[in-house]
Image (cartoon, rainbow, N blue to C red):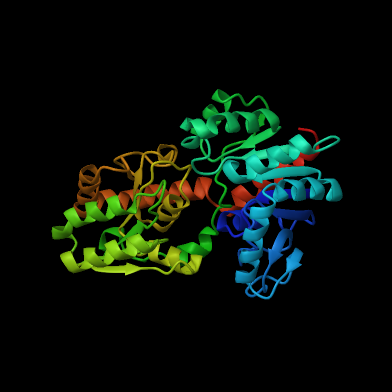
């Protein structure tokens, strides 16, 4: 089987999905939906079609690079920017040409706003029969962008043109149908590939969750992320946090500044984990956190929420991320509005003062993880997705 993935080549989510199918003996090709010349270090056993790429340091030797090599990644970035300026449609034409050359059995665009739109334009210009096309919804692809006038018509056009659809939330199944999708919808399950539960269990604090003295805060602060609201809520809880450490991950520069000011004004130990921190270390941190906070105005099932559940940390999650499909509000986690520090403060105070709540939630969330997040359950589902398409299902 030949599979052409159109996806972000530097994304951990792309790497995790590929890891589920890389050992099947299939020919897997990756066309980066955002031309950056980079490959995530966890990727293996694929061919990647860059325009330009720099030195392949830290990249698995099983990856085959296509494109023009240059002396360093910064040189690749520069060459790509120049190409974008003088030839705006070059990636559409490159994708069309590669589809014609490798003749994939399946095309799979992972994410809509970059990969889906790009694949749609290539299909419009393609001569002959276009291969079966899967569209996978990531994050806010439909839930948030579908409400924006700039994107609604494009999303409808993608869903009308593709043959198959997959997503992480039942919410997004309903939304895809509402936006006109008529094809085959695959069963809902996370795109992360699941967890090796036997291994991650060794990273968890061995005592009760109520004994833990750290709080994890997702550091995203951008068009969707609302880390600064979470930091403000924690500041309002400072009287309960004197013995705690606040740990922030995936933080941009503005969160660095806010975190330093937070620490100076409250005296609470605050640590920012570097972006290059390994997943092993991040999971270990989750396994020592009493509470994990993730806030955004739109998402699918947040990977950090699943990581918190697996590692026993009590999740406080914005209600925009279909978390209600995984946790029971007030019992195994607390759902909050993403932009209201007062409500988030009350949730944090509840989780800090109710030992029975966080201990019981950890037990129930582990049971959910065993039933729905073990990689031995999710990997066959990913493989079966492609087999069914190849068999005409």
Front residue of this view, candidates 265 and 134? 265
Residue 220 occupies which quadrant of the picture? Answer: bottom left
* Residue at x 57%, y 57% (from the top left corner): 11
Coordinates of residue 233 in the picture (x, y in percent) = 23, 51
Coordinates of residue 234 in the picture (x, y in percent) = 23, 55
Q: Quadrant of the C terminus?
A: top right
Q: Is residue 301 rendered to the left or right of residue 267? A: right
Residue 270 occupies which quadrant of the picture? Answer: bottom left
Residue 42 shows in the view: no
Q: Residue furthest front?
A: 86
Coordinates of residue 355 in the picture (x, y in percent) = 23, 54
Residue 170 position (above or below residue 138): above
Front residue of this view, candidates 315 and 49? 49
Coordinates of residue 33 in the picture (x, y in percent) = 64, 50
Q: Is residue 315 rendered to the left or right of residue 385? A: left
* Residue at x 37%, y 63% (from the top left corner): 253
Residue 122 shows in the view: yes
Q: Is residue 137 rendered to the left or right of residue 368? A: right
Q: How many marks?
A: 0
* Residue at x 54%, y 56% (from the top left corner): 195
Residue 124 position (above or below residue 312): above
């Amino acid at each position: 089987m030949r599979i052409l993935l159109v996806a972000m080549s530097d994304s951990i989510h792309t790497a995790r999905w590929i890891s589920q199918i890389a050992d099947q003996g299939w020919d897997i090709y990756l066309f980066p939906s955002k031309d950056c010349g980079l490959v995530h270090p966890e990727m293996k056993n694929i061919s990647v079609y860059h325009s330009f790429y720099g030195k392949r340091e830290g990249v698995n030797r099983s990856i085959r690079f296509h494109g023009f090599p240059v002396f360093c990644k910064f040189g690749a970035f520069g060459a790509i920017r120049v190409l974008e300026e003088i030839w705006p449609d070059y990636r559409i034409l490159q994708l069309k040409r590669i589809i014609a050359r490798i003749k994939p059995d399946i095309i799979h665009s992972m994410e809509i706003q970059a990969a889906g739109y790009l694949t749609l334009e290539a299909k419009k210009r393609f001569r002959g029969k276009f291969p079966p096309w899967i569209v996978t919804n990531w994050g806010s692809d439909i839930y948030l962008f579908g409400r924006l006038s700039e994107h609604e018509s494009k999303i409808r056009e993608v869903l009308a043109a593709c043959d198959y659809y997959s997503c992480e939330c039942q919410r997004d199944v309903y939304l895809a149908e509402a936006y006109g999708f008529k094809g085959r919808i695959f069963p809902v399950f996370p795109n992360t590939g699941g967890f090796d539960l036997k291994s991650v269990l060794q990273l968890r604090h061995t005592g009760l969750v109520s004994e833990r003295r750290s709080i994890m805060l997702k550091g995203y602060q951008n068009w969707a992320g609302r880390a600064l609201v979470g930091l403000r809520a924690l500041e309002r809880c400072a009287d309960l946090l004197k013995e705690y450490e606040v740990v922030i991950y995936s933080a941009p520069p503005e969160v660095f500044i806010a975190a330093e000011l937070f620490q100076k004004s409250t005296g609470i130990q605050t640590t920012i984990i570097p972006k290059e921190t390994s997943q092993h270390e991040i999971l270990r941190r989750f396994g020592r956190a009493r509470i994990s906070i993730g806030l955004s105005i739109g998402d699918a099932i947040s990977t950090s929420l699943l990581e918190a559940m697996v590692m026993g940390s009590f999740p406080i999650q914005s209600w925009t991320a279909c978390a209600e499909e995984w946790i029971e509000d007030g019992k195994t986690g607390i759902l909050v509005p993403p932009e209201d520090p007062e409500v988030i403060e009350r949730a944090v105070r509840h989780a800090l003062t109710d030992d029975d709540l966080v201990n019981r939630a950890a037990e129930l969330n582990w049971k959910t993880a065993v039933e729905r997040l073990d990689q031995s359950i999710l990997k066959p589902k990913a493989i079966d997705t492609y087999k069914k398409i190849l068999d005409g299902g």
